[in-house]
Image (cartoon, helix red, strand yellow):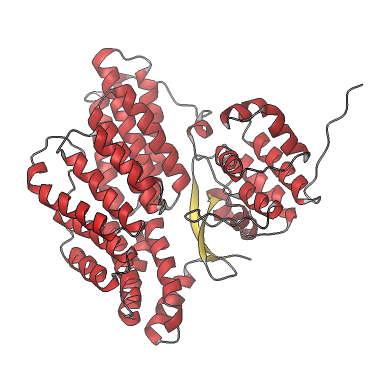
Amino acid sequence: MGQRPKVLTPDQSPVHRFGYTLRKFREARRYSLRGLAEKAFMSHSKLQKWENGERPPKDRGEVELVDWLLRAGGVLVDLWERINPGVSTPGGVSVSAPHVSEASIGLAVAGVQQAASDHEGTYIPVRLRDGSVVFVALDRRDLLRGGVGLGAAAAFSVSTSADADAVTGLKLPARSAAAYSGTPIEHFKRARRLLIDNDNLLGPGHAIKTVRENIEHIKTLRRDTQGVDRQALMELQTEYAEFASWLYQDLGDVERAEFWLDRAFQWSHTVGDSDLTSYVMARKAQLAGEKRDLADVVDLAEAAQRIARPRSRLAAVARTYESYGHALRGEFSHSERAIDDVRNALDRVSSDETPWGVWLNEQYLDVHHAQGLEVLGKHAQAAQIFTNAIKTLPEGYHRDRGVYLARAAVAHAGAGAPEEAAGVGLQALTVATDTGSGRIMRELGRLDQALIPWQRQPEVSAFRENFDAILTHEV
């Protein structure tokens, strides 16, 4: 008789606990051992030994990849760190989940299994016991009825239907081109335009479900379409994927944002539109900048410039993001030179007929310049530029105003002006509450920490109390 497989439980050693949790997440995501091993570019036997607790993982990168594929929200990385307590978290990596009792593992995995049938979850900011603020994903149904303990949710950052394979079971009705007053392409283009316009006013949470559903509808229509219309639908599908990435980015969900940008990049090559591919690559540089990825942001921006037409608007957009990448690296002269290059090119690129990057203007450039100055430690100068940009922002740019306010507040705090920082921070907090923007909340989390030295001042205390009041707290 063959040897019976080991039955692991979560109350064993850290190595066995890792294997137990890995198997539970794999089964919840409906991966076979071989299927997951192929996706992770590793041997089936190695993955099996991980699950059986026979061999502890050695390579953090492999664990991070498996964690991402299983949408485990950092749980596996957190358990790996318990096996390797002497290994520090690399810079630029998001805060891993806090430690909790292993009894909560079942709740976390149950949440993953349940979420596989849901269209959408929600990201919420959580105050941890050490005072820091992190974002965790929580199943929306459980959030509404209080069915999952927040401790388990915060501890495991359980994602909900994040990727395309989470909606493959979605039953869509047959789509008929004759059902639309115009063409289906015109219909979905108008819908996308309306969603983009409303995003700045209402925030990303109102649009993401519709965007995801429209991507699936477009896929359905493509099955029965030929020639030019099929190509146009593929291009529109790519544009929707990029927009989905932006919405997730604003929600504060970087993993899903990266997923949809990767899909958009892949689909853009199918379309064969070099402008679209260049734009998506530039967006990847922008997202890397938001993650403060010191390695990728400049490289991605330079790659976008190589793809873009020479001296085009998209080349200038990518150069703008490159400037911020140099600032993150502490390369002041390189950052300033890139900003000056784009500023000198604004008049020339304004006549570029591409629909991408039409928002590149003096104000947009100023905001990115200020963002770079802030990370370079030139806080007062950054705060002044942000303040001027806010004054000239058109009506209706509610969420963007909140982002600029939050970044201005952080700059004021860095410049040693806590009262002004707290006052501006309260304004940004109002916009964050209106829109549900995770980008604003992340900046306000930075502000909350920056204001600690002045926490006894009345204005600072008022901001921190109001900020704390809208956070969920780790239990």
Q: Residue at x 36, y 56 (%)?
A: 329
Does the image show residue 180?
no
Quadrant location of the N terminus in the rendered image: top right
Query: Residue at position x 46%, y 78% from top?
Result: 452
The correct choice, above or below, for 67 with respect to 460 in the image is above
- Left or right, residue 183 beside residue 458: left
Whether residue 154 is visible, yes or no, is yes
Question: What is the x, y in percent for residue 198?
Answer: 28, 48
Horizontally, residue 355 falls left or right of residue 112, namely left
Q: Position of residue 52 (x, y in %)?
A: 77, 37
As drawn, the residue found furthest toward the bottom would be 457
Out of 56 and 201, give the one closest to the viewer.
56
Residue that appears at 22% across and 69% down: 387
Q: Is residue 223 above or below residue 158?
A: above
Question: Could you say which quadrant of the image residue 356 lies in?
Answer: top left
Above or below for 203 versus 170: below
Quarter of the C terminus within the rendering: bottom right
Q: Residue at x 25, y 54 (%)?
A: 334
- Residue 103 placed where, x, y %? 75, 54
All told, the count of numbered labels is 0
Residue 166 x/y as whole percent: 53, 34
Left or right? Give the position of 262 relative to 382.
right
- Residue 107 lies left or right of residue 207; in this view the side is right
